[in-house]
Amino acid sequence: MKVMLVGGGGREHAIIRKLRENPEIEELYALPGNAGMDQDAVCVPIGAKDIDAITAFAREHAVDYAVVAPDDPLVLGCVDALEAIGVPCFGPRANAAIIEGSKVFSKNLMRKYGIPTAQYETFDDMDAALRYLETAPIPTVVKADGLALGKGVIIAQTREEAVTAVREMMADRKFGKSGERIVIEEFLEGPEVSVLSFTDGETVVPMVSSMDHKRSGDNDTGLNTGGMGTVAPNPYYTPAVAAECMERIFLPTIRAMKAEGRPFKGCLYFGLMLTADGPRVIEYNCRFGDPETQVVLPLLESDLLTIMRATTDGTLAGTEVRFSDRHACCVIMASKGYPVAYEKGFPMDIPADVFPHVYVAGAARRDGRLVTNGGRVLGCTAVADSLGEAIRDAYAMVERIHFENAYYRHDIGARAMRALTED
Ligand code: AMP
Ligand code: GLY
């Protein structure tokens, strides 16, 4: 069987490693992939947003199944285009990927179907948004409607900050068309949980929960990033919370999308906040999270390709999805200066016994050697019987990897450890 994966970061490396466990796969292509995964897949220099080139490649190489991992191609209709030439896919069509592609859409969906989320207003007129801010409760949260590389969310601690955010999005077009419309919403507090789920449009099967660490600095200081590390499971996500989320959030969302004529197939990511008033949806993503995938998939005991195909075929209800009860920790090593400005091209030294636990996010090859080629460079994942051991083992691997300007957080998993010991 020939399988093609669209995308090229650490998440994609984790998906590829897991897919590789299935012996039916003879050829595995990554478009574009990156040099750090070229031992696990054939990397093809086609960009993840180049839908025409992706479909042409799939046709030319008689690809049997495609996995579309990143948000951009999903929102742009990559799955629709591949299905149109007869290639079955893992991932939602564009009309369902809009659940991530438009925050106005997702907020209105939640309001219509009574799914718990922050109170909000939407605006396509800047003056109306500024008038609303004159009396809005502070802190408040300003969000660009469309995709913005994870930077389109501003937590405003003062009225002035909120006004600046609105002006930057709507007048200065800091995020281009993504800021044509905005959402202004209630500021919520509580631990955050990421729950990725498999769904075929009818059945939803949550994966093991996880906790991301989004800020660049230790103790959650500094700028928001794509994610500096993760642990799974998330200790705040107790069986009681899980049951409540299933009943009030997961199933209602799947049913709502179906009722809207937008059945969602693939991985639906629920970004949740556990507030004093119960779980609330902070965001939906139409794809696997990065770096959540790097802790979730190593704990998956069932065959990933079989599950993915079941989401495509609508047979998820009869398919085994089993996770181990162990713990995982992923520490991201980034280039110093990420997420703002950083240098790349530094040779990477990764011991051979560590490499199988490394998911490479940004690397190129120069004279046969891997060199850094991105903000997030790689993630080290350890799996162990306890969270404490997983954290210790992940950092032990990090200590053995060297490249110039390497930067990482030292407290991945610390909050989860505190939650466990406070119980
Ligand atoms: P998002 O890009 O939607 O994941 O938002 C980025 C981060 O902003 C989230 O992970 C939260 O930490 C924070 N955030 C988003 N919405 C809210 C909210 N309504 N209240 C408090 N924090 C929020
Ligand atoms: N780690 C957060 C995301 O993938 O959106």
Image (tube, grey):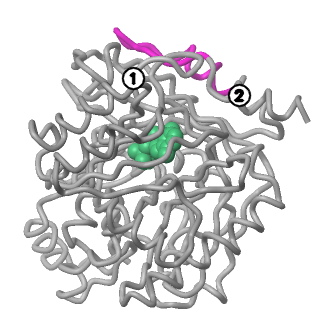
- In magenta stretch: residue 397: yes
Kindly indicate whether the residue at mark 2 contacts the one at mark 1 (C-beta within 8 angstroms): no
Q: Position of residue 6 (x, y in %)?
A: 28, 60
Residue labelled with disc 1: 223
Rendered image quadrant of residue 383: top right
Q: Which residues are magenta?
A: 393-410
The quadrant in which the C terminus is found is: top right
Q: Position of residue 209 (x, y in %)?
A: 67, 53
Q: Is the residue marked by circle 1 packed among few (<14), some (14-19), or many (20+) residues within 10 Å?
A: few
Indicate the secondary structure of the residue bearing disc 1.
strand
Q: Earlier in the sequence, mark 1 or mark 2?
A: 1
Question: Mark 1: which amino acid?
Answer: Leu
Residue labelled with disc 2: 415
Nearer to the camera, 323 or 396: 323
8 displayed left or right of 223: left
The answer to whether residue 304 is above or below residue 46 is below
